[in-house]
Image (tube, helix red, strand yellow):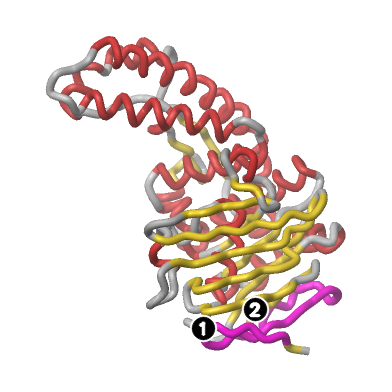
Amino acid sequence: MHLARLRLRDFRNYPRLDAHFPPGFHLLLGDNAQGKTNILEAIYLLATLRSFRGVGGQPMIRQGAKGYFVGATVVGQGEHEIKAYWSLRERQLTLDGQPVRRLGDYLGTLRTVVFCTEDLQLIKGPGRARRRYLDLLLTQTQPGYLGLLQRYAQALRSRNALLKQSLLDEAALESFSQELIARGNEITQHRRALEPQLAELVRAAAAGVAPETEELRLVYQPSVKEDFAVQLAQSRPRERTWRMTLVGPHRDELQLLLQDRSAAQFASEGQKRTLALALKLAQAELLTRTHGVPPVLLIDDVMGELDRRRRGGFLPLLERVQAARGQVFLTATAEDWPAAPSTDRHRWRIQAGTLTPEP
């Protein structure tokens, strides 16, 4: 799988871009604030329909423009054309010329894994960052998981809206509760099934990045300990006080433990970077095993935060991408990536929203 062509119109600081990318290793060079990360953001947006920077659509519109356009040609099992337009008044998404009606029919057209400074939130941030990591991984590997997640989210929103009303509709609440329980139990089962395989991959990745890493454990902690229906019923008095649903998969946690101590609280900054990197390497490895080909890797200027040994942790993955004729996009202010493949290497210079190939 690779991104063969990228087109941007009024996206971030790009008034217009039309670039062709063969498989291989693409090094995007330029000073800060020139638009390197914006290209990775556009590719990730095509894959997931969201920004890895955690922003909505409006900040991605170039200043003074009404909306942005992002288009791509993706080569995988066949060739696909993607076109996406976003403005405050209009949103369009087409795949091979047809409007996308269901996200499940679209996601997977392009698969990416992004490595960026925001990854530290997987270790230091709130539980929702780790739940989002689990859900993205399951969406990328389990057919039907996205629809399941959407049905749970809809039931949760509807139930919370009822709990905020002064006069409670008990019949409607019970209906949404039953849907929440059914879908929530399925989500928990998927997450439980993922835990042992993911834990093994994360441990292996951490050992490859930093062999001296202390004993690492990854533990999935569901909000529902035994019977979801019973716990939901028991939480009703507190729900009326807080006016929201207090138990369910939306409150799950993924714990990272070093020597049985919370990595968020006790790990050093270097250890936290190692663990964040290990989580993303594990994601890329699981996608490769599931689909038989590696995802497109987006590595955003994080090398300056890693020593040579930790950079070496990327080598097995990069070699696999190269062997499979996959793609890597790496941004940097200087060419200081000694582990880059010697073949299929492409250099690009980015300056003020302009992308220029270099010999």
- Near-viewer residue (293 or 334): 293
Image quarter where the C terminus lies is bottom right
- Local SS, label 2: strand
Cα gap from disc 1 to disc 2, whole angstroms? 11 Å
Asked if residue 324 lies left or right of residue 153, the reply is right
**Residue 265 image offset from top left, x and y in percent:** 38, 50
* Residue at 28%, 28% in the rendered image: 160
In primary-sequence order, the first of circles 1 and 2 is 2
Q: Nearer the viewer, residue 352 or 346?
A: 352
| Numbered mark located on residue 34 in the image | 1
- Please, is residue 76 above or below residue 59 in the view? above
Q: Position of residue 322 (x, y in %)?
A: 83, 63
Q: Which residues are magenta?
A: 334-357
- Asked whether the beta carbons under mark 1 and mark 2 sit within 8 Å of each other, the answer is no
Q: Is residue 204 left or right of residue 31?
A: right
Q: Quadrant of residue 192?
A: top right
Residue 82, numbered circle: none
Kind of residue at badge 1: Gln
**Residue 169 visible in the current orientation:** yes
Secondary structure at badge 1 equals loop
Q: Quadrant of residue 252?
A: top left
Question: In the rendered structure, which amino acid carries the disc numbered 2?
Answer: Leu
Q: Nearer the viewer, residue 72 or 309?
A: 72
Residue at image position (73%, 78%) is 338
At horizontal 72% and vertical 85% (from top left) the residue drawn is 357
The N terminus appears in which quarter of the rendering?
bottom right
Q: Above or below — where is 308 with respect to 88?
A: below
Q: Quadrant of residue 70?
A: bottom right
- Residue 340: percent from the left, percent from the top? 76, 73
Assess whether residue 338 is covered by the magenta stretch: yes
Q: Which mark is residue 28?
A: 2
